[in-house]
Image (spheres, helix red, strand yellow):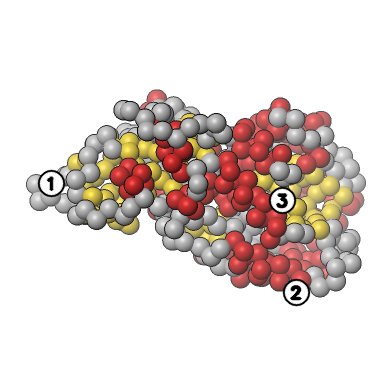
Amino acid sequence: MNPILKSKNLSRLLAFSDTLPTPHIIIDPEMVKNEFKALCSKFKSTKVFYAVKANPNPEVVRLVAKLGSNFDVASRYELDMLIGLGIEPERMFYGNTIKKAADIAYFYSKGVKTFATDCHEDLMKIAHQAPGSRVYFRLLLDGPENTADWPLSRKFGCRAEVIQTLICEAQEAGLDPFGISFHVGSQQRDIEQWDLALRAVSEICKESPVPIRLINMGGGLPAHYLQDAKPMATYAVHINNYIEKYFPDPETRPEFAMEPGRSLVADSGVLVSEIITIATKSVEGEVRWVFLDAGKFNGLIETLDESVKYVIKTEHEIKNAIVSDEPRSEVILAGPTCDSMDIMYQDYKYTMPDDLESGTRLYFLSTGAYTSSYASVCFNGFPPIKTYVLPQNFEARRIQK
């Protein structure tokens, strides 16, 4: 069962949703809090750096900061928000390997002294704009894109032999080459990818001319979508075992960090959308097209190539905690914009009740990550989808429509 369906706050969340126009996203903060605590308990010796890009909602960021999280920051705009929330720059990494010299200087001026890098040109920018800073080098991995729902390794990182060269160049440029990072791909279902990555990193550490003091394992822990994943505790047991296998001596073992985003906030969110129109394209009565007021450009971009398949519930199903026994048939789900690529699911056929009507709400579960932050600013004039955090004092009561 999807975690949100087991939340004690589900009835309050649904009642709060009823007060809001669609489309919107609602976050259950208690689920974020519980997930953060569970993560820390399973990875006791690993520092957590929340990936702000997953969900930059200020209330979410403030919550994980209060719980003790550090932060993986991707841009000066995220940095400004964090500083505005009173979060110390010492708790931040500038984790984007693609950055302007002016942005490096800006981070440095605000007190951030730790930067990711993966090439000579970027390294020299850091040396000139942020002298004396710590740098960690992102390793390019082979293979994880084949087992991750949302692969991203090819754009970032470099080979191990390049990292060895960059370590020497960093020393010569007056920087502190203190770490290695990797990312096994977002929504990674193959736990052995961490084994392969940590083995590769351990080889770099052995060949490095300086001691490596940090290993940043990035993200990759999964959320609960239609194709479910193993429990986080299972990932933790294996990953902790891999760490001990490749870095057996606690006295010389580097510090470990991770950058959870999806796994920390996805399951806490529900995206609520209204059906605009239900249509068939021919008199033969082929598969129904169900057009929603949220689509690829407004919260559901990770349905691109049908990569992420969300659990979707009708209003009747989620509010009555049942699986509808009414006759069902296949549908194609599409968004509201005048763009032919705004189709979420066409090859994979979801089924919906045959008596589904326009005006009914659909609930996309585990949508707390990479939904609002990926939404377009104003495509076709539609405003970005709004995110709401469930108020602590909101009373669950039936809202009259």
Residue 57 location, quadrant:
top right
Mark 1, Cα crowd under 10 Å, few <14 / some 14-19 / many 20+, is: few
**SS state under label 1:** loop
Q: In the rendered structure, which disc, 2 or 3, sits on the residue that comes first in sequence?
A: 3
Foreground tag (3 vs 1): 3
The amino acid pointed to by label 3 is: Val
351 over 237 or under it: above or below: above
Q: Residue at x 27, y 34 (%)?
A: 359
Across and down, in percent, residue 328 comes to 22, 54
Q: Residue at x 65, y 64 (%)?
A: 236
Residue 339 in sight here: no
Foreground tag (1 vs 2): 2
Foreground tag (2 vs 3): 3
Find disc 2 in the rendering and name its residue: 245
Residue 140 in sight here: yes
Mark 3, Cα crowd under 10 Å, few <14 / some 14-19 / many 20+, is: many
93 over 80 or under it: above or below: below
151 over 86 or under it: above or below: below
Find disc 1 in the rendering and name its residue: 282
